Image (cartoon, helix red, strand yellow):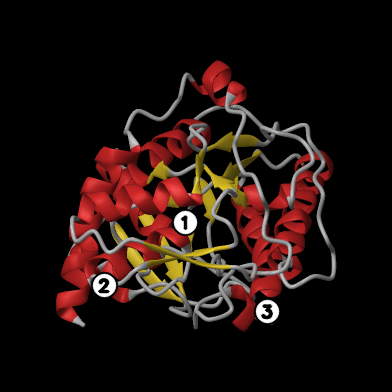
Amino acid sequence: MITGAAGFLGSHLSDRLLAEGHEVVGLDNFITGKPENLAHLAGNDKFQFIRHDVSDYIFVPGKVDAVMHFASPASPNPASPIGYPNLPIQTMKAGALGTHNSLGVAFANKARFMLASTSEIYGDPLEHPQKETYWGHVDPIGERSVYDEAKRFAEALTMAYHRFHGVNTCIVRIFNTYGPRMHIDDGRAVANFIQQALRGQKLTVYGDGQQTRSFCYVDDLIEGIYRLLVSDIHDPVNIGNPTEITIEQFAKEIDDLVGKKAGLVFQKKQFLAGDPLRRQPDITRAKDWLKWEPKISLHDGLGKTIPYFKDQQSIA
């Protein structure tokens, strides 16, 4: 069972599990997920879709061997209709009630449970790069808190079910990911830069552009998630690309790849209060425990992603 199955990651995860020969039940209420992300699975007798809000009680007929809770708004952009600043209550409910209901399915079925957590639980980190042992530096009432604290609560609840009920749980902390099926209007750097570059517009960089991120291509991420799912690991594991790049460098890379050479424009205001200045995963656990590390370069990953955005713009 995958919650958020019509989302960017949920749909790729559905594909991977089906390719491995598993049967998949996907849940989504389409607040941020898109039906077209699952359209190619129509008629697949190993895939069942249920339109459902995970903050309500979840019932899935039949035996479930694994529950993967991926339902949540994820974009921090207040200008995006799917950004969690515009869906604050839904974001908190997905992290709290959605996690509780999903854990209930895993508990009832004696199933493996995976929580999709996030690098945002580290907040604006005082440790760099971020290890799983770092407790974070998070503002509990700021603009980003609805997402950050929802995920932190979800991790605590997951571990409570593991320790008290003996549920076979795991937690994946996902760092910035990009690729086909991203929501083109999610308002984050990848989507904004590619769309502006395709239109021949200058790429808007917030602040001085020296804040850093690390971008992981979706196929690499899904591989790491799958390896964690089939492992016997319970502690949180960072999955992301440790190659750190400034936002300015990232924008220039996209500008060069699209080829219209529009250039960059800097806006001095901060993207969102509390926007982390640095973000880079320590993936030692993933390397040692899962024998995983990303293989697809940023250049190659963007080469696979930009055509998707071109197609989406032509459809629009």
Whether residue 112 is visible, yes or no, is: no
Which residue is the site of mark 3?
Answer: 88
Distance Cα–Cα, label 1 vs label 2 = 19 Å
Q: As displayed, is residue 278 above or below residue 40?
A: above
Residue type, label 2:
Glu
Q: As displayed, is residue 83 above or below residue 133?
A: below
Q: Report the disc number at residue 36.
A: 2
Label 2 near label 1: C-beta < 8 Å? no
Determine the secondary structure under disc 1: loop
User: In this image, 42 relative to 92: left or right?
Assistant: left
Determine the secondary structure under disc 2: helix
Which residue is at a point 32% across and 44% down the rendered structure image? Answer: 16
Residue 226 picture quarter: top left
Determine the secondary structure under disc 3: helix
The image shows residue 171 at horizontal and vertical percentages of: 64, 42
The mark lying in front, picked from 2 and 3, is 3
User: In this image, 183 relative to 209: left or right?
Assistant: left
Neighbour class for label 3 at 10 Å: few (<14), some, many (≥20)? some
Distance Cα–Cα, label 1 vs label 3 = 25 Å
Q: As displayed, is residue 137 above or below residue 54?
A: above
The image shows residue 185 at horizontal and vertical percentages of: 39, 75
Residue type, label 3:
Pro
Which residue is the site of mark 1?
Answer: 1
